[in-house]
């Protein structure tokens, strides 16, 4: 400072300058996002510097959905439908307003590993009558949806679900969806690992950490224990596959999880093996760090690219895994493919019928739910059967059906008779056992076709016109979201509006694909026919199935092997040659 200032003046000026500096620093700290939403705000800021944030990101920033519960209660009191921003926010509570298809809400639950007690299933049946349409839908994430909920009952539904010891929070919008696992976990004779504790731990980790809400878009996680019924973990963003490490190459032998990333079959990709294995006790921590890398760097300006697959495509696996390791503060464990024993094969028929458990003298019973639909009375009836004849537990599967566990050998016949009395069955033709359909146009505004109705028509026709003697999976999905995963079906159908005149008139219909598979046969189906009218779909599927049965190399050749052995033109020609007159 200048020598012209006195000592007191110098001290005053030094103090003044220090005060300005402190004030500036305090202002800088105050403007930086803090709290559990900080990482999301910072990611939004970075994204906004390179493009326009999508509306959903703006809505989350304007008001976090979990801060808006009083307004949902007020809307219910007024029986008012939500505007678009709130329709998005209420999905954080598992509520989807599905107008114009239905002037009502759908409530989606979270049921980790698909596990229900008998009293929970009975309670859900009661709720569907009290507040919904009187039925339940079992989904392809081993979950439950309740439909036709009036706006006045929306908040009451969420509260009643929680009263049952279940959850709907975070079941929709930009969150981690229901955590799936092997449906026969803990009772499967061939499993390497019981997935129930890991699915449960991941479930509660998500629910109790708000910083994991508000991702760039939805996220799927699955744990597969190598049981007879798969969890379709390779269709998830993160798949943990139980494997037996026999020759560790510096890694302790034993059961580990193999880490697969980037599955999203609606965008034509399976989760790919990363070369990383994870100790089971570290799986939740590793999943958490994967999620946080996605939070920081996932696309928030383009919803069609806002999935983990696209970040992996942009970065490559090594860069992504390095970012995960940085958050972990330690390297991930790698193991070469030859250090891992072949996994036990899945049984495509094990979700239907009577099957012995690892516990001597006990069985699980796979009950067919027609296209995943269950009336309230049937829900209460299955709950009663589980309580009276089994261990009181039920398991939902990704094949849209339910298992009753712990049925003693001497009680099986009585349990089967009780199931039959409900109008349900534990027997199914190879076609119906593998028939999967999303909600479709009857309950979803995105769907181009009424998938459940058309799936039933296809099964009715094909069982007579093209009966099968080996399992065949037929998947119908209504739109590009591919909730029924049409790309992994032996025969997959995706809804389309089919032109029927030069004036632009259209009718419901499908594009038909063949040759998809999962697990050991993982691969994407190829398009065989375009723009098939829904009324013609049963006949078209039947001639595809007849061509397979008549032209397969031997009786043991699967449909997927047959379809992949031929090019599309050959398959189309064979189907036409085997068409009925």
Image (cartoon, rainbow, N blue to C red):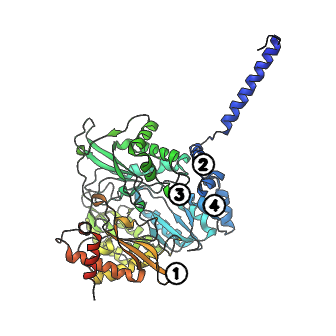
Callout in the foreground (2, 4):
2
On the question of residue 48 being in view, the answer is: yes
Q: Residue furthest left?
A: 554
**Which residue corresponds to mark 3?**
303
Q: Residue at x 35, y 74 (%)?
A: 419
| Mark 1 vs mark 4, CA separation in Å | 32 Å
Q: Nearer the viewer, residue 182 or 507?
A: 507
Marks 3/4: CA distance?
16 Å
Classify residue 108 as left or right of residue 312. right
Of mark 1 and mark 2, the one earlier in the sequence is 2
Mark 2, residues whose alpha carbon is within 10 Å: few (<14), some, or many (≥20)?
some
Of residues 23 and 345, the one nearer the viewer is 23
Residue at the spot of label 1: 504
* Image x and y of residue 19, in percent: 75, 25
Relative to 331, residue 529 above or below: below
* Marks 3,4: beta carbons within 8 A: no
Give coordinates of residue 134: x percent, y percent.
51, 74
Residue depth check, mark 1 versus mark 2: number of the one nearer the observer? 1
Element type where label 3 sits in the image: helix
Residue under numbered circle 4: 85
N-terminal-most mark, 1 or 4: 4
Q: Are marks 1 and 2 in contact (CB under 8 Å)?
A: no
Q: Nearer the viewer, mark 3 or mark 1?
A: 1
Mark 4 lies on a secondary structure that is helix
Pinpoint residue 102: horizontal percent, then vertical percent: 57, 74
């Amino acid at each position: 400072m200048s020598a012209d200032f006195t000592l007191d003046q110098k001290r005053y000026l030094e103090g003044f300058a220090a005060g300005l500096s402190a004030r500036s620093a305090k202002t800088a700290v105050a403007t930086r996002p803090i709290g559990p939403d900080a990482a999301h705000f910072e990611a939004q800021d970075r994204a906004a510097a390179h493009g326009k944030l999508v509306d959903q990101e703006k809505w989350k920033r304007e008001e976090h959905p979990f801060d808006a519960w009083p307004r949902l209660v007020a809307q219910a009191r007024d029986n008012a439908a939500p505007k678009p921003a709130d329709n998005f926010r209420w999905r954080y509570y598992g509520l989807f307003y599905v107008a114009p298809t239905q002037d009502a809400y759908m409530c989606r639950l979270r049921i980790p590993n698909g596990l229900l007690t008998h009293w929970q299933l009975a309670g859900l049946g009661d709720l569907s009558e009290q507040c919904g349409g009187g039925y339940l839908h079992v989904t392809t994430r081993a979950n439950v949806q309740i439909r036709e909920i009036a706006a006045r009952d929306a908040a009451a539904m969420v509260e009643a679900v929680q009263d049952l010891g279940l959850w709907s929070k975070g079941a929709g919008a930009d969150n981690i969806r229901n955590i799936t696992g092997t449906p026969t976990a803990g009772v499967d004779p061939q499993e390497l690992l019981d997935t129930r504790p890991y699915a449960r731990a991941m479930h509660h980790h998500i629910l109790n950490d708000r910083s994991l809400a508000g991702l760039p878009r939805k996220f799927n996680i699955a744990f597969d224990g190598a049981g007879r019924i798969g969890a379709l973990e390779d269709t998830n963003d993160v798949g943990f596959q139980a494997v037996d490490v026999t020759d560790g190459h510096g890694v302790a032998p034993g059961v580990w999880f193999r880490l697969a990333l980037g599955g999203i079959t609606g965008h034509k990709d399976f989760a790919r093996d990363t070369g990383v294995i994870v100790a089971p006790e570290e799986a939740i921590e590793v999943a958490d760090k994967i999620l946080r890398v996605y939070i920081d760097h996932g696309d928030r300006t383009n919803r069609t690219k806002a999935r983990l697959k696209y970040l992996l495509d942009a970065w490559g696996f090594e860069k992504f895994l390095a970012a995960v390791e940085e958050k972990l503060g330690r390297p991930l464990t790698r193991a070469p493919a030859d250090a891992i024993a072949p996994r036990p094969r899945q049984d495509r028929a094990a979700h239907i019928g009577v099957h012995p458990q690892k516990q001597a003298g006990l069985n699980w019973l796979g009950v067919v739910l027609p296209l995943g639909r269950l009336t309230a009375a049937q829900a209460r009836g299955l709950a009663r059967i589980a309580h009276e004849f089994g261990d009181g537990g039920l398991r939902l599967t990704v094949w849209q059906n339910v298992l009753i566990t712990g049925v003693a050998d001497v009680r099986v016949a009585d349990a089967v008779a009780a199931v039959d009395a409900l109008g349900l069955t534990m027997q199914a033709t190879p076609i119906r056992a593998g028939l999967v359909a999303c909600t479709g146009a009857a309950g979803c505004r995105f769907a181009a076709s009424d998938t459940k109705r058309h799936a039933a028509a296809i099964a009715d026709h094909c069982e007579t016109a093209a009966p099968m003697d080996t399992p065949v999976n037929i998947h119908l999905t209504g739109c590009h979201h591919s909730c029924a995963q049409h790309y992994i079906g032996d025969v997959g159908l995706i809804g389309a509006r089919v032109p029927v005149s030069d004036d632009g008139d259209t009718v419901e219909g499908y594009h038909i694909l063949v040759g998809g598979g999962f697990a050991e046969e993982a691969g994407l189906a190829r398009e065989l026919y375009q723009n098939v009218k829904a009324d013609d779909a049963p006949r078209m599927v039947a001639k595809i199935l007849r061509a397979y049965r008549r032209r397969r190399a031997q009786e043991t050749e699967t449909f997927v092997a047959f379809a992949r052995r031929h090019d599309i033109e050959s398959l189309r020609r064979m189907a036409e040659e085997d068409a009925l007159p």
